[in-house]
Amino acid sequence: MKEIKKVAILTAGGDCPGLNPVIRAVTKTAITKYGLEVMGVRHGYFGLYHGDFIKLGLEDVEDIFTKGGTILYSSNKDNLFQYPVKDENGNLVRDENGKLVYEDASDVAVENLKKAGIDAIFILGGDGSLTSARDFARKGVKVIGIPKTIDNDLAHTDYTFGFDTAVTVATDGLDRVRTTGMSHHRIMVVEIMGRGAGWMTLHAGIAGAADAILIPEIPYDINKVAEKIQKDKANGKDFSIVAVAEGAKSLDGKQVVSKIIEDSADSIRLGGVGALVADQLEKLTGSEARATTLGHIQRGGTPTSRDRILSARYGYAAVELCMNGGFGRMVALRGDKIIDVSLEDVIGQKTKNVDPNGEYVTLAKAMGICFGD
């Protein structure tokens, strides 16, 4: 095997608390322990396509562990294996039916890595970003995957970095609307991120003492939520807290879509279910209801100590895996141990969703929390 002398780090997909601590851990371990040269790929796969590399030294990463986001920037619209074609003026090209035209631009990225003399690349991302990581591994690129998503829905790892921070922010949001709900005797609905998996909403809802938790895995009947609120009111509780995931589904299985981003690899943008639920509950209960959407504040800000530690463990383990030739694999947390699994096993598997009959839902229901089922 060719000796590893120069490595690169790429952050792709949505930004996430903990990205910078991972970049720091990878860079410091690679330089301090192994004397490697470290490069950063700016703007995710977009930067890989354009050869946008910068050198990373110890001084560049020393004080980034408290910062949210990523110093390398990111993009969540670029799948180089299905890249939208643009004309000489930068306009998207369409076929005769008006549909966008795509091409496989991955060879350009592979050539850019070769020109830069990069022997291996660490890719920090969720399901979509790591799908491309797997595909690059199939093309012979020496890839190490590091799991990142605030949704915590990636298969084969117990926790992804960023999840703890996002849950902490969401819990704080529930705590804060609780006081105004109590003051005005209102139903306070808080919309929390989570497209297909309700882990954030479930954890925050339990921690924030929500009266109802609505998640994608359990289709809800709004009438049952209203009945729960009415029952609590009859028992003397004059306010209610409802935590709802942005991907929550009513009994008809529909999710609320806010807009479509045509040239994005993941074109559907969810949002608005919180306002819908608040409006429905106000009509059904006769109580005043207000909706709050936490949105991107869940992604930003200082990562929690737990996320910083997990990020450091992932970063260190990723470098060790690289130096031991474990390419085409992803570091993961299993129990309290860092392991590694094949990207082939991670990608294409069913995402890790909340079990409607699992421990967390069971304990929540035992405490009187309604899921609308």
Image (cartoon, rainbow, N blue to C red):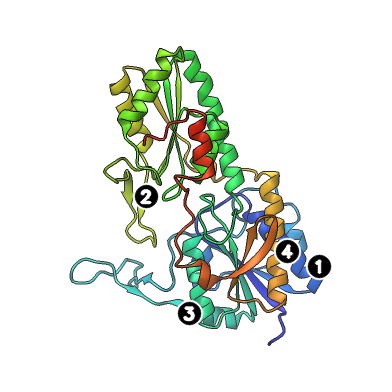
Marks 1 and 4, the one that precedes in the sequence: 1
Q: Secondary structure at mark 4?
A: helix
Marks 3 and 2, the one that precedes in the sequence: 3
Location of the N terminus (image quadrant): bottom right
Q: Secondary structure at mark 3?
A: helix
* Residue receiving disc 3: 108
In the depicted structure, whether residue 71 falls above or below residue 184: below
Residues at marks 3 and 2, CA–CA distance in whole angstroms: 29 Å
Q: Residue at x 51, y 80 (%)?
A: 138
* Residue receiving disc 1: 32
Tag 4: amino acid: Tyr
Q: Disc 4 vs disc 3: which is toward the camera? A: 4
Marks 4 and 2, the one that precedes in the sequence: 2
Instruction: Say whether marks 2 and 1 touch (CB < 8 Å).
Output: no
Residue 251: horizontal and vertical position, in percent?
29, 41
Tag 2: amino acid: Arg
Q: Disc 3 vs disc 1: which is toward the camera? A: 1
In the depicted structure, whether residue 303 falls above or below residue 4: above
Seen in the image, is 63 located left or right of residue 48? right
Residues at marks 1 and 4, CA–CA distance in whole angstroms: 11 Å
Residue 197: horizontal and vertical position, in percent?
45, 49
* Residue receiving disc 2: 269
Tag 1: amino acid: Thr
Could you say which is closer to the camera, residue 350 or residue 11? 350
Q: Disc 4 vs disc 2: which is toward the camera? A: 4
View extreme (bottom): residue: 1
Tag 3: amino acid: Val
Q: Secondary structure at mark 1?
A: helix
* Residue receiving disc 4: 316
